[in-house]
Image (cartoon, rainbow, N blue to C red):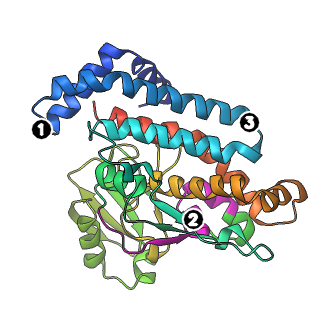
Amino acid sequence: MKDKNLSAFYHQLKSIPYVQSFLSECYRRENFSDYEKLSFQNADRFVYYLEHAETYLNQAKKAPVSIQPMLLFYGLTQLIKTCLMTKRPYYPENTSLLAHGVSARKRKKQSYRFLQDEVKIQQKGLFPYLTSHLFSIHQFTVDKFSMEQLLKRVPEMSELYDIQHKEKPVIKVGNPGEKRLLIPLDIVNDWHLSENRFADKLSHYHFPVKDWHSDQDYLYITSDRILLPFESNLFSMDAEGSCLYLCKNRTFFYPFHEVMTHFLLLYNLSMICRYETEWWGELLHSFSNNDYPYILHFLSITAKKIPIMLGYYLFNQT
């Protein structure tokens, strides 16, 4: 689906009658017996969440960088709530879900660097709830992530890493709408995996492998399943939804949807701009810190990708 069609879909979601039928079908598929009643009760709330998200994201485009993270984070969370309503008609079921579900570590003022900062996933709150119900990720191999680890998962950040460090953290491996992946054998060998083991791990991570073969340069993997744009928990995509990317670092090879990456980065940036005002102000005005280009580039990327990623999630429910 092209951007203009995604825009039309968002406009259609401003209609209460359409949203009622949309939610009714979602709840019917989720086996709620009273799906028509639930869709009637939730349609207004769905539209208000969507309108609130749109307001935050539009204001972020006009706002100075100093407050963009806060506006983008709130816009993201409101859009996430619209997506949750397609699966969880009674959200929020309890007050614990009103917490973010993530925490930031204490910072040392003198030597603090954003790229080395970390966030930790909590057992309760919005983040573990959305990962479970939107992306079927119920547990994590690790519960702490550095900002640099997260930034390297975003395909568009690869250009900046190439300029700074002559490295690209991700590599193109395919296209949505196709049933084939093309994995450089260098990656498989660097990970100390056999070709068969690599294919098995893909199947384990919800990309069912039908067949595979290799030549001297590539591992060719085919599947019966077509990946829709922004559907995969394993592969990231560019904003156009035209290419699939895989992180080259083996430690990143586990299910982790890109929406989750943007959530954690924006959570931390929003906390910094609200509560670490001195460091944040010096970063924005002195240009003396190498964190600045990464933050600025990410903010421009996430402002564009938030409505696209979550818009596709909603569209894929139709």
Looking at the rendered image, the quarter that the C terminus falls into is top left
> Residue extending furthest front?
95
Residue at 55% of width from left, 56% of height from top? 155
- Which of these two is toward me, 115 or 210? 115
Q: Is residue 222 left or right of residue 131?
A: left
| Location of mark 3 (residue) | 63
Say what amino acid the circle numbered 1 marks.
Asn
User: Counting residues from the N terminus, which is met first, the one under dot 1 or under dot 3?
Assistant: 1
Q: Give the range drawn in magenta.
A: 138-160
What is the CA distance from the residue labelled 2 to the residue labelled 1?
Answer: 38 Å
Q: Indicate the position of residue 248 as horizontal and vertical percent values.
A: 49, 71
Label 2, label 3: how far apart the Cα atoms are: 26 Å
129 on left or right of 196: right
The residue positioned 78% from the left and 57% from the top of the image is 280
Residue 31's label in the rendered image is 1
- On screen, residue 233 versus residue 318, left or right, reads right
Answer few, some or many: residues within 10 Å of disc 1's Cα (few below 14, many 20 plus, some between 14 and 19): few
Give me the disc on residue 152.
2
